[in-house]
Amino acid sequence: MRRFSRLAVLLGGVSGEREVSLRSGQRVMASLKRQGYQVVGIDPIDEDWLDRLRTTAVEGVFLALHGKGYEDGTVQGTLENIGLPYTGSGILASALGMNKIMAKRVFQAMEIPTPAYLPINLELDLDQQCEEAIEQIGFPLVVKPTSEGSSLGVSIVYQAEKLRWTVEKNRDFQENLFEQYIQGKEITVGLLGIGSQLRALPVLELIPQNKFYDYEAKYTEGMTQFVVPARLSETVNQMAQSIALRAHLALGCHGYSRVDMIIDATEQPFVTEVNTLPGLTELSDLPAQAEAAGISYDQLIAEILEST
Ligand SMILES: Nc1ncnc2c1ncn2[C@@H]1O[C@H](COP(=O)(O)OP(=O)(O)O)[C@@H](O)[C@H]1O
Ligand SMILES: [Mg+2]
């Protein structure tokens, strides 16, 4: 028995990831229509989006939004207030997933491996903080914003002379952190399902042509090679999937998510972040991981919808 017949797909929005979201949303809408749902697309860039959502008599919302304001619990709170069920994680897990420092505090409490870090306080002595980071973590050092995406503001620093300048450069981001650089294989693991159905999808390996998976490598076709299933020993593969599952549960994620990790030279995976609304475009990681598990795009969308 289907719980819904009329659905809204929220897509677009005003975040830095608007274009990706539009592509995710178009594809989700086409899939839901194929599956017999009545679907209306609503874009929060329009001033009257909330009025439209309230007056179109939909029974639920499929979130195809990404980024700030949408992946951080904000839109989830709005939907809770108007009493509409929505796909994916709730307010708290979304907020934790979007904040790299808070997520790390949870990972550490739950003994989930994550690179060492130090929060940066732009109001306090920066030279002193740089020295502490060099002493406690050492080079190379990653400097990154706490709540961004798409690799915006992520730098890898190799020398003391460049550290303070790199931090200054990130002043426009509300909050930043120093992080231990992990040299190794970059992988991402999709999680799908609720309750006893929750499982890790096949691991996907990313091989960027650039020095790291930066903005250009993410959004220029041909700049990154995707390998699924990843070339890992069975032991490491299982370890990565089990850590991803623990990270998903530690933050309290719901329905689906995608956990990014780096595996170092000793084959230890480190969680760098949990994406609570991963991309659903034709080129996105999660649909490719699902396909490798024999789950078609329509089946993936149906299962995400069932989890609302
Ligand atoms: N600690 C790290 N060690 C090595 N590479 C890193 C580290 N942190 C980030 N990177 C590189 O930067 C990319 C973006 O960083 P990430 O923390 O995932 O931020 P975003 O939320 O912008 O995707 C990663 O995919 C990876 O290539
Ligand atoms: Mg990332």
Image (tube, rainbow, N blue to C red):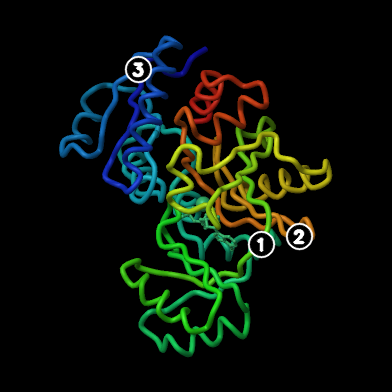
At label 1, counting other C-alpha atoms closer than 10 Å, the crowd grade (few under 14, some 14-19, many 20 or more) is few
- Whether residue 121 sits left or right of residue 53 in the image: it is right
Q: Position of residue 286 (x, y in %)?
A: 55, 34
Q: Nearer the viewer, mark 2 or mark 3?
A: 2
For ligand 1, tell me if the residue under mark 1 lies within 8 Å. yes
Tell me which amino acid carries mark 3: Arg
Give the quarter the ligand 1 occupies. bottom right
Tell me how many marks there are.
3
- Whether residue 22 sits left or right of residue 258 in the image: it is left
User: Looking at this view, is 268 or 248 the one in front?
Assistant: 268
Dot 2 corresponds to which residue?
265
Dot 1 corresponds to which residue?
183
Between discs 2 and 3, the one toward the N terminus: 3
Could you give the CA–CA distance between mark 2 and mark 3, rounded to whole angstroms? 50 Å
User: Looking at this view, is 78 or 115 the one in front?
Assistant: 115
Q: Give me the residue at 39% from left, 13% from top.
A: 33
At label 3, counting other C-alpha atoms closer than 10 Å, the crowd grade (few under 14, some 14-19, many 20 or more) is some
Q: Are marks 2 and 1 in contact (CB under 8 Å)?
A: yes
- Whether residue 264 sits left or right of residue 225 in the image: it is right
Between discs 2 and 1, the one toward the N terminus: 1
Q: Give me the residue at 27% from left, 21% from top.
A: 57
Q: Residue furthest left?
A: 47
User: Looking at this view, is 213 or 262 the one in front?
Assistant: 213
Could you give the CA–CA distance between mark 2 and mark 1, rounded to whole angstroms? 7 Å
Q: Position of residue 127 (x, y in %)?
A: 45, 89
Tell me which amino acid carries mark 1: Gln
Q: Are marks 1 and 3 in contact (CB under 8 Å)?
A: no
Tell me which amino acid carries mark 2: Ala
Q: Which mark is residue 6?
A: 3
Q: Nearer the viewer, mark 1 or mark 3?
A: 1
Q: Residue 49's quadrant in the figure? A: top left
Q: Is residue 272 above or below residue 5?
A: below
